[in-house]
Image: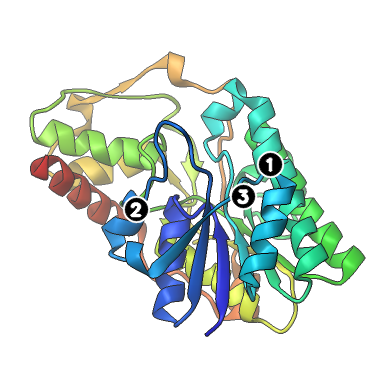
Amino acid sequence: MPRALITGITGQDGAYLSQLLTDKGYDVFGMARRTSTGGFQDGRLRWLGIADKVKIVDGDLTDLSSVIRLVQGIEADEVYNLGAQSFVGTSWDQPLVTAQVTAVGVTNMLEAVRLVRPQARFYQASSSEMYGLIQEAHQTEKTPFYPRSPYAVAKLYGHWITVNYRESYGMYACSGILFNHESPLRGIEFVTRKVTDAVARIKLGLQDKLFLGNIDAKRDWGHARDYVRAMWMMLQHERADDYVVATGRTTTVRHMCELAFAHVNLKIEDHLVVDPKLFRPAEVDVLLGDPAKAKAVLGWSPEITLEEMIVEMVDADLARLTTK
């Protein structure tokens, strides 16, 4: 039975990746940082019905000694580093925390693997936010980066330190440059889930307005279930490399909202309000990934459309709120 260690097990991607790996017969360990107030939050794992199939272990990406102990004790065949301070907006308010977790934390994981489990295959969750002020209309693995937030800068460090360890130490280390990927498990602070939750609340009469910032921003949105499949496929290939994971289709926030409102027979103009206070200090206006390399080398392609994903998310939020 192969063993996998996943950091960020409590997040959207960690939960879906855990489901994928347990279905494939893996013994899955999830690293979680416990707090004195909330403890370990396994809501996403429970939502997928796999909470009892994953072994949770204490650890902290900012504490190298704890990471070394975990990697040494678990003896994982595959290590997926998904843990991060992953909300772009928060990174302006907490730039140092973002740097410590999202940037330096990657080095801690790589160093632990190098020292005590060098034969393990390592996956780093890079981000399309690294492209920022885009230098090419379609972003590929060779497109220059121009990060526009503390989060994106931290992710860029994590990306390049992974490349550096691969080339310097011969480690099997991959980076997946994932474009926006969503699901019913997405955090409420992210725009897609903010929209689908608000649409559900408006439909149920629990609120009347949805307040957003830059609704003309364009994103390449896919489903997290498709994207964690790409992560796993990267680590199965004979050679470690970096891959863009995207749909190759860009859509405005406005159109995404229109899809959500239309699903419950509501008019967007009756409820959507643009709030200038919600604009970011530095905007990323357009992201559009080119997944040609992942398709050609790995045989990966997305299976779930944006329209199907938004319907799934709205329906899930309607069910959650109705149950409450």
SS for dot 3: strand
Q: Amino acid at mark 3?
A: Ser
Spatial CA distance of label 1 from label 2 is 24 Å
Q: Is residue 66 left or right of residue 22?
A: right
Spatial CA distance of label 3 from label 2 is 22 Å
- Residue of label 3: 127
In the rendering, at what x and y percent does residue 69 appear?
Answer: 69, 58
Q: Is residue 320 left or right of residue 139?
A: left
Judged from this view, the residue extending furthest toward the right is 168
State whether residue 296 appears in this view: no
Q: Residues within 10 Å of mark 2 (few under 14, many from 20)?
A: many
- Residue of label 2: 44
Q: Residues within 10 Å of mark 1 (few under 14, many from 20)?
A: some
Spatial CA distance of label 3 from label 1 is 20 Å
Q: Is residue 118 left or right of residue 58?
A: right
In the rendering, at what x and y percent does residue 234 appear?
Answer: 63, 73
- Residue of label 1: 62
Q: Residue at x 49, y 78 (%)?
A: 26
